[in-house]
Image (tube, helix red, strand yellow):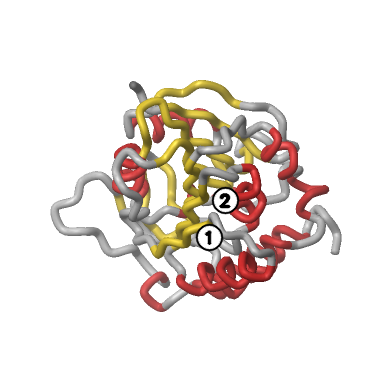
Amino acid sequence: MNMRFGPLFCIALALLACRTPAQSGKAAPTPGDSTYTYKTRSADGIGKYYMGREIAYYMSHRAADWLDRPEREAEERPSLLLASLDLRPTDVVADIGAGSGYYSLRIAPILPQGKVLATDIQPEMLDIIRRKQAEEQITNIETILSTETDPMLPPGSVDMVLMVDVYHELAYPRELMQAVVRALKPGGRVLLVEFRAEDKKVPIKELHKMSEAQARREMEAAGLIFRENKTILPWQHCLVFEKGA
């Protein structure tokens, strides 16, 4: 499949797979909630806006194979991201929106005395992770069924939160990030990986991209401190935020 159009085609299939009748028109506001605004949705959005950004549809488990596609290394260079994580063997890492476990399964061996908390709102995704970790005999991944507003992580329990191409799809970004901050230990990090909206050559639909400025605005609204943008990936921002001591 052509590298330029392959991701676009597969994301389109994934979005079609996860649409429901409730998402076909204007998103329904939560009574008394002034955090979000609502308009008729665009082709790839849910019609709900946060800080001026329309929230995108999330990827269905029915398109999970795209996350494990063989060309992912050549396109996104995830090995570079993994090499940059600077983890200690005892760390606890939360992979939020873990999907098929692409990163969870690769991070777990780096943490022989620690563990990965793989969270997702789709139980089918967690089933995939459990099957893979059994096949690979990985014992330090804990799967957690989360909700749209809460990753279900214990307070002060996590050294690093990883979100790879997930944040832009969160239906309740403010509430979920508040819960993330509570789950982080003092000095804990959030690593936000998002396709670069500033680069029109990145072959991903626009609502599935984020600019650095928008990401920083939303993370700082949650109380996180921006530390750096690791410019190591060909298509994605790799933004590091920290919880204050």
Q: Give the left or right position of residue 36, taking residue 220 as reference.
A: left
Is 214 in front, or is 181? Answer: 181
**Residue 134 location in percent, x, y?**
62, 69
In the figure, residue 185 lies in which quadrant? top left
Residue 83, by quadrant, is top right
In-image side of 234 versus 84 (left or right)? right
Residue 156, above or below 30: above
The residue drawn where x is 56% and y is 22% is: 228
Residue highlighted by disc 1: 44
* Whether residue 85 can be seen here: yes
**How far apart are the alpha carbons under marks 1 and 2?**
8 Å
- Which of the pair 215/157 is nearer the observer? 157
Q: Looking at the image, which residue is at 50% across and 61% down? A: 58
Kindly give the residue lying farthest to the bottom in the view shown: 21
On the image, the x and y values in percent for residue 227 come to 50, 21
Q: Residues within 10 Å of mark 2 (few under 14, many from 20)?
A: many
The reply to whether callout 1 and callout 2 are in contact (CB within 8 Å) is yes
x, y percentage for residue 32? 14, 53
Q: Residue furthest front?
A: 113
Residue at image mark 2: 208
SS for dot 2: helix
How many numbered discs sit on the rendered protein? 2
| Amino acid type, residue under disc 1 in the picture | Asp
